[in-house]
Image: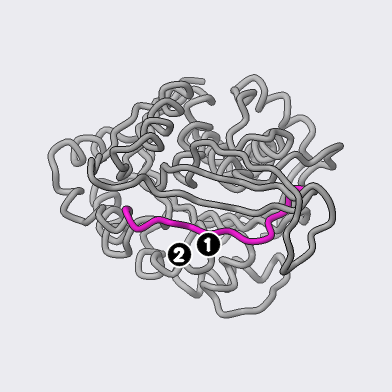
Amino acid sequence: MTGRQVSIFGGAHIDRRARIFGTTVPGSSNPGSWFEEAGGGGFNAARNLARLGHDVRMISPRGGDAAGETVARAASEAGVIDCPFIFLDRKTPSYTAILENDGNLVIALADMELYRLFSPRRLQQKAMREIISASDLIVTDANLPEETLTGLVARANAGTKPIAAIAISPAKVARLVQSLPGLTFLFMNEAEARALTGRDSAEAAEWPVLLEAAGLTGGVITRGGKPAIAFQNGRTVTVAPPQLDALADVTGAGDSLAAGFLSAFVQGDPLDICLRSGVAAAGITVRSPLAVSEKMSRAMLEEAIRLVPSAEILS
């Protein structure tokens, strides 16, 4: 298989994560430790896709600070072609998360004001038009302003380019509501699916129906340890994640699932194979203390896919 040209727009910032050593005690001081690395939904997906052999460009606002230099180094190390908009007088955005001892999220804070400066006018620049035109696949995340997301989806549609989006959070996925009909796929968890549909819960077979009613033609819903769901144009499949011996950190798992899925999709694989590839990629990530596993590679992914159960076809 040969790599494809993928352009990713969205978050590329600093992730700070604290892990509590023992049982979490709300409203109290908890012993633990801090860890810091480059992150962001779009950037995590970009680095995974680059490690899977694709030609990846990352387009994102960044501050002229040490944190921005950390992001640039991480891009270089992963083989991502870095195309930032640098604001020298601003600070690079950050995401700060508190994790349980078992790796599950307690609470997080996103300082993302700089992304507001990625206006739709940026998309009109010649360099951006050329990047979009040369892309086999465009990916964005919901860190960008709503009007920019709308403009990017419109440009992708005008050029008949497939475009996928990563929901990021229940609050941010609302920025994609107007763009849902133009998306090829939207990657989300059940909380984000609830935010889009207004439903508190749904069975696996119900989510695609509800999301299609909201305007989405293709999507992937992750459900923790339950089977992930993928649907497109009336077809729905589920894949159960394999049992894990150990869970290092769930940070970045959804982004790597999107990368594994899209790596297969852009190569022309069917929906069930795409979802198995995504679940396998997520499995590699949650075994790593990093949001993007340094072990991620095409060979490692192919090995991990063998451990993923076959897809169940729902429709």
Report x, y in % for residue 20. Answer: 75, 50
Quarter-wise, where is residue 129 in the image?
top left
Q: Depth check: give the residue in front, 69 or 210.
A: 69
Q: Depth check: give the residue in front, 259 or 204.
A: 259
48 within the magenta span = no
Report x, y in % for residue 258. Answer: 55, 44
Q: Look at the numbered disc 2 and give the secondary structure of its residue.
A: helix
Instruction: Mark 1: give few (<14), some (14-19) or many (20+) Cα within 10 Å.
Output: some
Q: Amino acid at mark 2?
A: Lys
Give the extent of the magenta segment.
103-114
In this view, 313 is above or below 214: above
Q: Look at the numbered disc 1 and give the secondary structure of its residue.
A: loop
Image quarter hosting the C terminus: bottom right
Q: Amino acid at mark 1?
A: Ser
Residue that protrudes farthest toward the front in the picture: 29
Callout 1–callout 2 Cβ contact below 8 Å:
yes
Q: Residue at x 86, y 37 (%)?
A: 245
Residue 240 visible in the current orientation:
no
Q: CA distance from mark 1 to mark 2?
A: 5 Å
Residue under label 1: 169
